[in-house]
Image: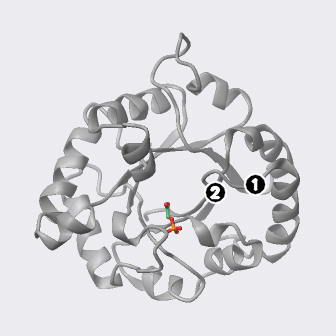
Amino acid sequence: MRKIIIAGNWKMHKTQAEALEFWQVFNSKLRTKGENKEVVLCAPFTCLSFLAKHLDNTGVLVGAQNIHWEDEGAYTGEVSGGMLTEIGVSYVIVGHSERRQYFADTNETVNFRLLAAQKHGLTPILCIGETKAQRDAEETDNVIINQIKKGIVDVDQNNLVIAYEPIWAIGTGETCEATEANRIIGLIRSQLTNSDVPIQYGGSVNPNNVDEIMTQPEIDGALVGGASLDPVGFARIVNYQ
Ligand code: PGA
């Protein structure tokens, strides 16, 4: 059975004090015991160590939002896999569209980061998705196939999560139709040799649309940005029905 993974992507939000406040409320509302479901909080670097200590043995895991492909070196502002695992991080988001758009990540550097994550025993969440212009030009399927093929060169599909995140749906309140997200995720799965890789949907997931999204047979979870900042709302998403 494929694992369900619900991950919050806090992006550049929350100090340690705010993370602690979040956690106290979120933890009191979680209902995941005995379910085939993993919950991950992908926080800014400054919160990771702090969160990992608070979340120890709670079943909720900590994720980073970026990783460099080298173990160390002259790469100002970057963080390596060993630095993340040392402080209790389990997951790392790789290739988020904001990293591709603002920080020049390419399919090739995304692939390097994925390989580095796996080398260090982290589970990478590979983000892929098309722009509005690509969708309007009916290039979506080709863009997705190209991103997946180039992204997963030499990657171990037994330790991988993929998130389909149409860029036009991120932070816009405009969710991709659940059936269309399901279709694209099926297309992604058809490109893999391991059909058990969990594939999430991301892009304006919220407490009101999560139930419908999670009824789709191909969708194995969600990567949630804005709505993961509110502990009550994010708990409702994790406890989807
Ligand atoms: P959103 O972001 O939920 O705010 O649309 C999703 C993401 O960027 O991962």
The crowd level at tag 1 (other Cα within 10 Å; few <14, some 14-19, many 20+) is some
Residue 203 located left or right of residue 43 = left
Rendered location of residue 93, percent (x, y):
50, 46
Q: Provide the residue designation for mark 2.
A: 10
User: Which of the 4 quarters of the picture holds residue 130?
Assistant: bottom left
The crowd level at tag 2 (other Cα within 10 Å; few <14, some 14-19, many 20+) is many
Q: Is residue 22 visible?
A: yes
Q: Is residue 152 visible?
A: no
User: Which of the 4 quarters of the picture holds residue 84?
Assistant: top right
Is the residue 239 above or below the residue 101 in the image?
Answer: below
Residue type beneath disc 1 = Lys
Which residue shows up at 72% across the image and 72% down it? 230
Which residue shows up at 56% across the image and 44% down it? 65
Residue type beneath disc 2 = Trp
Q: Provide the residue designation for mark 1.
A: 14
Which residue shows up at 68% across the image and 38% down it? 45
Q: Are marks 2 and 1 in contact (CB under 8 Å)?
A: yes
